Amino acid sequence: MRCAKVVGVGLALMVLTWALWVGAHQGTMEMRVRGPGEGSYSTALTKGDTIWYSGFEPGDPLGVNVDYNAKASPDEWHVTKRMLYEGTTTWMTAPVDSYFCHIGDDSAGYSDGNEVGYQIELDLTNYSDANLYYLSAMQAYDVGEVYDKFVVWGTNEGLGSSWVNLDPGEGYAWGGDWGTSWYSPEDSLISLAGLVGHAGVIIEFWFYADSGHPEGFGVGIDEIIITGIPATAVEEVEVGSALPHNFVLGRPYPNPFNAQASIEYQVPDAEVHLGIYNVRGQLVKTLVQGSMVAGDYIVTWDGRTEGGVEVGSGVYFCLLRSGDIALVRKMVLLR
């Protein structure tokens, strides 16, 4: 269990207050797979630690744009709050929080003859397994229903210049009009097993528009999550070890989550408050309150309020407080 940074109560509350504006433009998300049947959030997201995460919110890490055809004024992947759905007045907004990443003009679609990539570079040398999750929306086709292409692929130093198609696989690309909903990968979680054990791993979201008259808003991506299992991972158990003298708040697990998240924490003998707060700094549910004996504990949150009402998708904060000690962890709930 890794330690969260210890801050004063005042600063912890400032962290919660900082997120006020994030919730001001929260969108909604319809979770469906790209294909037949109903999709669901995969519990496979519990696999390992979070290696890289971006919801494209302020302070989140960003990838790198690659312009393959060097057009004078190419469309580029860029962070935005909304994009206009073709032929309507419907604005697509982020599935979670306020921002997402988009290829094309936010109100006028994208250009023909465009080929650009959004790359994330990783060091997976010390991982035995890794997985990718993301959300996307797409509307990209030429007149006559000739669909432009969207591919997620990856490479590493061991593959040289070769690329492996990650989603949807089978050697083909996504294309067409998915509608105004956000979609998860077809298999919910994409295995990066063929890329682990290497530095210089690149995950790329690639978009190509052939010549013609393009229609649609292009492609949007959000909530990119890459998790991994360290190759040297061991269970941190010490038989007969001394009781803890410090406060530790572990990462919620899984994160993001759908049905419930587990939260590990460690406390000395102390009065403890452990609660869930929304982006407005309001208490959603108290998980622990009272005097505790020194030890390691685990508690779960099922995404409900004190009254048992399900809360909506979005960002929440887990706050562990005792005296002038406060630990904060960010949580993302996806319905």
Image: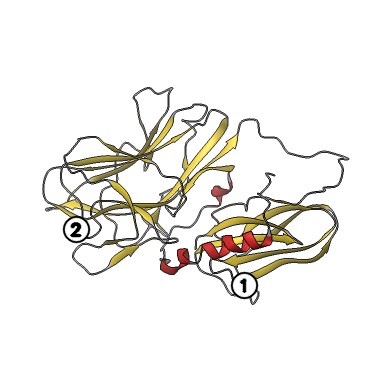
Q: Amino acid at mark 1?
A: Thr
The N terminus lies in quadrant: top right
Pointer 2 or 1: first along the chain? 2
Q: Position of residue 313 (x, y in %)?
A: 49, 65
Q: Can you say whether 16 is above or below 184 in the image? A: below
Instruction: Answer with left or right where residue 195 lies relative to residue 94.
Output: right
Label 1 SS? loop
Residue depicted at 58% across the width and 68% down the height: 281
Q: Position of residue 298 (x, y in %)?
A: 73, 55
Residue tagged 2: 108
Q: Position of residue 261 (x, y in %)?
A: 62, 57
Instruction: Answer with left or right where residue 68 lies relative to residue 112.
Output: right
Label 2 SS? loop
Q: Residue 305 got which mark?
A: 1
Residue 34 visible? The answer is no
Residue 192 visible? The answer is yes
Residue depicted at 73% across the width and 38% down the height: 235
